Image (cartoon, rainbow, N blue to C red):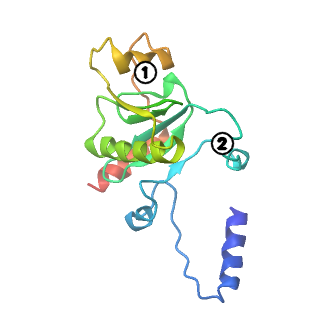
């Protein structure tokens, strides 16, 4: 955080003290601030060491993202684990040849719409527009195609458990309900 403050002052000096600064809190960003980042800001797991990798410097890594929120939908990369999946949100699984959208049974239309925008962004930016996209709906008893492929990737041979919300998630959900 100290580096951020130092760089802000450095930028002020370079711009002759004419810059205007605005503070935005993570997960509580204003709509105007979020509008500058289309389709969204994707928060990545890990520290500074994970952000300085050059493209193509390693094999493709499967990534899992969660889209959650009412009104303003936040997208965050989460650890690739079956235990992360739940019925309340939309998840995006980005594999080498296919991107899956898993619509939790209790997810809302805003989360599903935002996920489609993010999938298009991922497809264009990281897959050169050539990978396949599959939509998997939670609770549908489909024993074929994309649902089976999605299940095999996660080793899903049993139902997804009920998600227990953390304190941060309860605060985010409470704030989201207040904005409606």
Task: Report the Cα–Cα distance between label 2 and label 1.
Answer: 25 Å
- Residue 33 lies, with reference to residue 76, above or below; the image says below
Comparing 95 with 23, the one in front is 95
User: Which residue is painted at 35% across and 47% down in the image?
Assistant: 114
- Residue 109 lies, with reference to residue 158, above or below; the image says below
What residue sits right under mark 1 in the picture?
Answer: 150
Query: Is label 1 in a helix, a strand or a loop?
Result: helix
Could you tell me if residue 101 is visible in this image? no
Left or right of 140? Residue 85 is right
**Whole-percent x and y of residue 142?**
29, 15
Name the quadrant containing residue 30: bottom left
Which label belongs to residue 87?
Answer: none
Give the number of callouts.
2
Comparing 53 with 77, the one in front is 53
User: Which residue is painted at 28% across and 20% down in the image?
Assistant: 139
User: Which residue is painted at 67% across and 66% down in the image?
Assistant: 4
Could you tell me if residue 161 is visible in this image? yes
Which label belongs to residue 46?
Answer: 2
User: Which residue is painted at 55% across and 77% down in the image?
Assistant: 21
Question: N-terminal of the two: label 2 or label 1?
Answer: 2
């Amino acid at each position: 955080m100290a580096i951020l403050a130092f760089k802000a002052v450095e930028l002020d000096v370079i711009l002759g003290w004419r810059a205007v600064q605005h503070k935005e809190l993570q997960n509580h960003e204003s709509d105007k601030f979020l509008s500058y980042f289309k389709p969204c800001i994707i928060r990545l797991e890990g520290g500074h060491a994970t952000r300085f990798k050059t493209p193509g410097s390693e094999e493709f890594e499967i990534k899992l993202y969660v889209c959650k929120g009412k009104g303003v939908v936040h997208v965050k990369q989460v650890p690739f684990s079956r235990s992360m999946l739940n019925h309340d949100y939309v998840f995006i699984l980005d594999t080498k040849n296919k991107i899956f959208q898993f619509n939790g049974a209790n997810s809302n239309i805003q989360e599903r719409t935002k996920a489609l925008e993010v999938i298009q962004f991922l497809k264009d930016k990281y897959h050169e527009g050539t990978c396949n996209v599959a939509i998997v709906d939670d609770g549908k008893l489909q024993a074929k195609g994309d649902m089976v492929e999605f299940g095999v990737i996660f080793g899903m041979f049993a139902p997804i458990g009920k998600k227990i919300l953390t304190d941060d998630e309860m605060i985010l959900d409470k704030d989201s309900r207040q904005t409606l």
